[in-house]
């Protein structure tokens, strides 16, 4: 029997995206300077218009969820997790009532297991702000089913690249795979002009790497700590904001990658990438 997520003839393959999700609920509050996040917000609002068709479902890999094994949300009505602190009261009242999709969660769990990767389902876990903050801009109607996929707390880049490969077939079934993180994420570097050139150097490496053939790109990302200024941009044991890029790049296979957004925010360069 054909399931909801079976591949269909003449369905355009979905791309994979790595997007920046900003700082907490930054798009929904006052900031100084007031326009700091405007270009990023505008990009997120526009990006859905570049898709070949409306997604049947979305797999969101957020930097804000780490587990001992890959874990997928399998509830049909996930709640929101307001995992940010010290922001205006109204930002804890934001709503994003997107449905879950237990069938897709089970399929992801199975694909990961078949790829030899540790995986499990979690029916109780909700959506964190790495998911719902950018989704409020990208798909504001909250009417597309979403399954969130965790990172693994070993922070091993190779296992995240492998996870992307394991779930890549979903792209041919109308499923959009999004990695939500930040291309630069050194909390001490934000707002420090000395980190401008440092972030530029790493961003240049990322951009060149995304444009390489799949096998070369895979190896470069597996060894990302060797990149120029890598550890100044993502300090040791704090690279979780880069790892969603590994998953989407793994899911990209041989598809070409490119930088689709870049902006200077808080003295650092922040970018987004698309594959396919």
Image: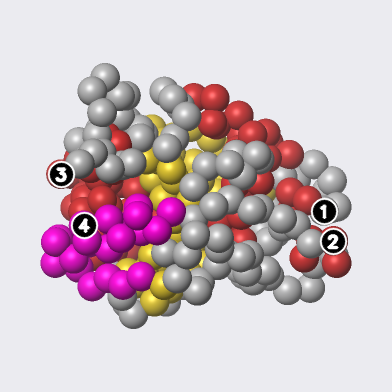
Picture quadrant of residue 214 = top left
Q: Earlier in the sequence, mark 1 or mark 4?
A: 1
Kindly identify which numbered label has been placed on residue 215. 3
Q: Secondary structure at mark 1?
A: loop
Write down the residue under mark 1: 29
Marks 4 and 3, the one that precedes in the sequence:
4
Q: Nearer the viewer, mark 4 or mark 3?
A: 4
For numbered disc 4, what is the local secondary structure? Answer: helix
Q: Label 1: how many residues lie within 10 Å, few (<14), some (14-19) or many (20+)?
A: few
> In the rendered image, which quarter contains the C terminus?
top left
On screen, residue 103 above or below 276: below
**Upstream in sequence: badge 1 or badge 2:** 1
Report how far apart the C-alphas of labels 4 and 3 lie in the structure.
21 Å
Q: CA distance from mark 3 to mark 1?
A: 42 Å
- Magenta stretch, main secondary structure, is helix
**Which of marks 2 and 3 precedes in the sequence?**
2
Residue under numbered circle 4? 111
Region in magenta:
101-121
Q: Residues within 10 Å of mark 2 (few under 14, many from 20)?
A: few
Q: Are marks 4 and 3 in contact (CB under 8 Å)?
A: no
* Pointer 2 residue: 90
Q: Position of residue 204 (x, y in %)?
A: 42, 42
- Going from the N terminus, do you reach mark 4 or mark 2 first? 2
């Amino acid at each position: 029997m054909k399931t909801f997520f079976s591949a269909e003839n003449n369905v355009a393959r979905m791309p994979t995206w790595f997007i920046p999700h900003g700082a907490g609920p930054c798009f929904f509050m006052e900031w100084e300077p007031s326009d700091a996040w405007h270009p990023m917000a505008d990009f997120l609002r526009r990006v859905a218009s570049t898709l070949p068709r409306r997604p049947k479902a979305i797999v969101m890999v957020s930097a804000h969820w780490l587990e001992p094994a890959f874990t997928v949300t399998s509830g049909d009505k996930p709640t929101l997790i307001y995992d940010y602190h010290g922001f205006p009261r109204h930002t804890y009242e934001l709503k994003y009532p997107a449905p879950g999709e237990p069938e897709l969660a089970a399929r992801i769990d199975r694909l990961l297991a078949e790829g030899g990767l540790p995986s499990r389902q979690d029916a109780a876990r909700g959506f964190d702000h790495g998911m719902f903050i950018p989704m409020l801009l990208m798909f504001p109607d909250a009417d597309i089913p979403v399954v969130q996929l965790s990172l693994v707390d070993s922070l091993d880049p190779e296992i995240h690249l492998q996870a992307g490969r394991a779930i890549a077939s979903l792209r041919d079934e109308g499923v959009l795979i999004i990695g939500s993180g930040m291309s630069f994420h050194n909390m001490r570097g934000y707002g420090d002009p000395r980190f401008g050139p440092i972030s530029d150097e790493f961003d240049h490496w990322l951009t060149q790497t995304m444009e390489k053939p799949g096998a070369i790109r895979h190896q470069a990302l597996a060894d990302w700590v060797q990149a120029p200024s890598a550890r100044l941009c993502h300090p040791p044991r704090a690279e979780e904001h880069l790892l969603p890029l590994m998953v989407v790049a793994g899911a990209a296979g041989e598809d070409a990658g490119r930088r689709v957004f870049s902006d200077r925010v808080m003295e650092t360069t922040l970018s987004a990438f698309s594959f396919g």
